[in-house]
Amino acid sequence: MSGQPDKTNAPVVTEPLGATASLGSESRPDARPVRVWAVVGGAVLVLQLYVWIRWVTGPYFERVPTGPSDPPTYMKVLLTANAVLMWVLVPFCLWFFIIKPWVRERRITLDGMLAASMGLMFFQDPLLNYVNTWCTYNAWLYNRGSWTSHIPGWVSPEEPGHQVPEPLLTNVPGYAFGVLLLTIGGCWAMRRIKARRPGISNFRLIVATYLMAVVFDFIMEACVILPAGMYAYPGAIQALSVNAGHYYQWPVYEGLMWGGVQAALCCLRYFTDDRGRTVVERGLDSVRGGARQQFTRFLAVFAAVSASFFLLYNVPAQWIALHADSWPADVQKRSYFSGPVCGEGSDRPCPDPSLPIPTKRSGYVDTNGEYIHPPGKDLPKTVPFERGK
């Protein structure tokens, strides 16, 4: 399936065989581009499987409790309805995007590969808290903790049962099919713009898609998801946030970052060739074997999807995390947002710019202002300078 409506059926140009060419030989496209993308996708997939296996078999596969605060009824109703709706859509999406095309064409279409790739992209969801915790999920939602501590180099401090949880029943179908449906909707909007303005350049079309994605993220997050209590951005820079100081504050740069991801996914699906192949599938015809070719194609698409999320969201999110503001009282008083990590019931104050940012291996300043050293570790000793005789 292709998001590009105005394909050009260019004539096939064949080159005459030279005098020394063997019978049946033909030039084949360079397979290096698609193979490079496939290698990247394969490496990311192996990493994800390794981390998930360690999580499921380790101590962090434990439910993070809600705490003493009970979410209001409207939150429970909205969050439950959202989860139910997501899973009602799952069988229909599986049939429409994967099973039906496979039965009809005996292959996985681009939308099917995008659905699988976006579902696996869910792995990156908690990476915005890699160096500092500035986003939290509602622990009332079903969870089994998170795999974050098994991600190589993870910095933010956490313990089993005391970490930002991942709501599995919501995020798994949300990433796989929710993001795919948004991408399909974005491609529909791109086709409408192209139909109304046939002469529009690709650059302007991409910019228009990005602006639409930012506006839609504001409507979706600031007006629906955050007030419903699915998650919160307590560490958001309040001077750059809408509804600052409330549990549903929405940082404007969140829309700018996710808008970039969504626009990139739309462009990946929209700008395809006359065979419905994306830019990362160049040279696919040189990969022999039906199953091997399809797997190579999937890994390349998965790499592009993963790179979009990683480079356009999670990389800039680390800089933002280092400049996070104090957590609002409206978040700290709700244990289902803050209790698993900091605040009442623990000796850890919630992150604040006046405090050092602790790491998983460092000590921390407790709620009494005293430094708590890591158990079993000694304070580093000062080594005197060498001095001349």
Image: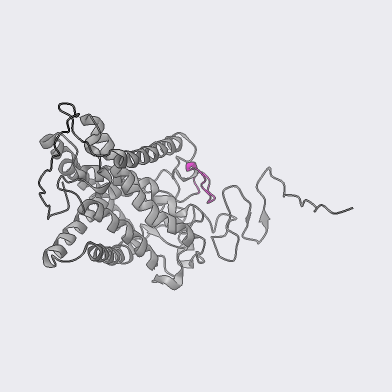
| Residue reaching furthest to the bottom | 239
Q: Residue at x 31, y 66 (%)?
A: 218
Q: Position of residue 126 (x, y in %)?
A: 42, 50
Direction from residue 89 to residue 337 in the image, left or right = right
- In this rendering, the answer to whether 325 lies above or below 103 is below
368 or 257: nearer the eye?
A: 257
250 or 139: nearer the eye?
A: 250
Q: Position of residue 48 (x, y in %)?
A: 40, 40
| Residue reaching furthest to the right | 389
Q: Position of residue 331 (x, y in %)?
A: 45, 63
Q: How is the image coloured?
A: one colour
33 or 291: nearer the eye?
A: 33
Direction from residue 43 to residue 206 in the image, left or right = left
| Residue 352 is one of the magenta-drawn residues | no
167 or 188: nearer the eye?
A: 188
Q: Residue at x 24, y 42 (%)?
A: 113
Residue 248 seen: no
Q: Which residues are magenta?
A: 150-162
Q: Position of residue 100 (x, y in %)?
A: 13, 39
Residue 312 seen: yes
Question: Quarter-wise, where is residue 259 in the image?
Answer: bottom left
